[in-house]
């Protein structure tokens, strides 16, 4: 379970404790981008209880979501890890749903399972209408351009089989915000892997601040065109 963090001191202890309580016996890797609020100290406090199941990588500054996940993927691939998951640190993703993500990959029903906010309906709690329209509209926009058969294109709650990450050239993944999720989905799909969405309930954070920004939205809007053009030119 890879969990990037930046200023999540109010959430990280509960997140890790609940992940450790899951019956799947998960391991967690926290990648903290130099959080000034003491997030890493919170990780270490839980790590004392589970020294063999929690690892912490501290980076010198805010280097971005995409680079954090790439660092986590490489860490996992260097070890005997078969199922590699992503999850936010703000409790918007319910750790109790992790089994629903992991089990289908373990059963070889898919190579990537996405915890989807939009498959079979909308299940987002406590978002303003403007944020919901932006997110849902981004999915329509992305599907129209890329032709990906995925409803929740920016989902950050998922489980990969390691063969997916072994097949993708991680050096060529350049997105760093929410566009990173779009790019990973697109590369997985274009490589011919099986993708399945399972419904989850997404609950907006109650502690801390959202990392959404105008720059992140602009990156995502442009990235879908770049991915499509690269695929058409055989440069993906």
Image (cartoon, rainbow, N blue to C red):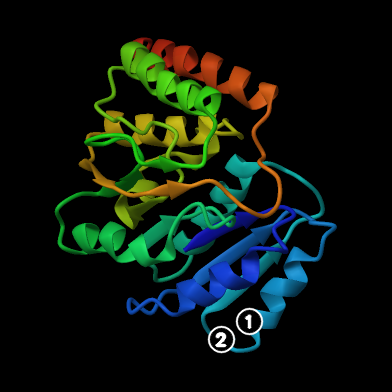
Q: CA distance from mark 2 to mark 1?
A: 5 Å
The image shows residue 90 at horizontal and vertical percentages of 59, 55
Residue sitting nearer the eye, 111 or 138: 138
- Mark 1: few, some, or many residues within 10 Å (few <14, many ≥20)? some
Up-down relation of residue 232 to residue 185 (above or below): above
**Residue located 41% across and 24% down the image:** 136
Residue ID for mark 2: 50
The image shows residue 1 at horizontal and vertical percentages of 46, 63
- Do we see residue 172 in this rendering? yes
Up-down relation of residue 204 to residue 96 (above or below): above
Up-down relation of residue 207 to residue 147 (above or below): below
Residue sitting nearer the eye, 61 or 101: 101
Residue sitting nearer the eye, 168 or 226: 226
Compared across the picture, whether 218 is left or right of 187 comes to right
The image shows residue 198 at horizontal and vertical percentages of 25, 47
**Residue located 43% across and 15% down the image:** 230
Where is residue 17, by image quadrant? bottom right
Compared across the picture, whether 36 is left or right of 219 comes to right
**Residue located 46% across and 18% down the image:** 224
- Judged from the image, the secondary structure of the residue bearing numbered disc 2 is loop
- Judged from the image, the secondary structure of the residue bearing numbered disc 1 is helix
Instruction: Residue lying at the far bottom in this picture: please name it.
Output: 49
Up-down relation of residue 10 to residue 87 (above or below): below
Where is residue 66, by image quadrant? top right
- Do we see residue 235 in this rendering? no
**Residue located 80% across and 56% down the image:** 34
Q: Which mark is residue 47?
A: 1
- Mark 2: few, some, or many residues within 10 Å (few <14, many ≥20)? some
Tag 2 and tag 1, C-beta contact below 8 Å: yes
The image shows residue 77 at horizontal and vertical percentages of 45, 60
């Amino acid at each position: 379970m890879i969990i990037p963090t930046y200023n999540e001191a109010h959430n990280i202890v509960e997140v890790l404790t609940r992940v450790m309580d899951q019956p799947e016996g998960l391991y967690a890797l926290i990648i903290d981008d130099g959080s000034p609020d003491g997030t890493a100290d919170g990780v270490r406090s839980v790590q004392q209880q589970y020294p063999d199941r929690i690892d912490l990588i501290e980076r010198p500054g805010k280097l971005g979501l995409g680079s954090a996940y790439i660092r986590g993927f490489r860490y996992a691939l260097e070890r005997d890890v078969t199922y590699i998951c992503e999850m936010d640190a703000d409790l918007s993703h319910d750790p109790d749903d992790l089994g629903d993500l992991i089990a289908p990959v373990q059963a070889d029903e898919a190579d990537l399972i996405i915890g989807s906010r939009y498959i079979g309906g909308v299940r987002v709690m406590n978002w303003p209408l403007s944020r919901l329209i932006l997110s849902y509209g981004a999915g329509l926009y992305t599907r129209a351009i890329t032709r990906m058969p995925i409803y929740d294109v920016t989902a950050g709650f998922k489980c990969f089989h390691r063969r997916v990450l072994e097949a993708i050239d991680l050096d060529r993944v350049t997105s760093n915000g929410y566009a990173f999720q779009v790019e990973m989905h697109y590369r997985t799909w274009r490589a011919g892997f099986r993708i399945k969405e399972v419904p989850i309930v997404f609950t907006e954070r109650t502690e801390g601040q959202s990392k959404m920004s105008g720059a992140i939205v602009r990156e995502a809007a442009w990235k879908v065109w770049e991915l499509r053009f690269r695929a058409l030119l055989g440069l993906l």
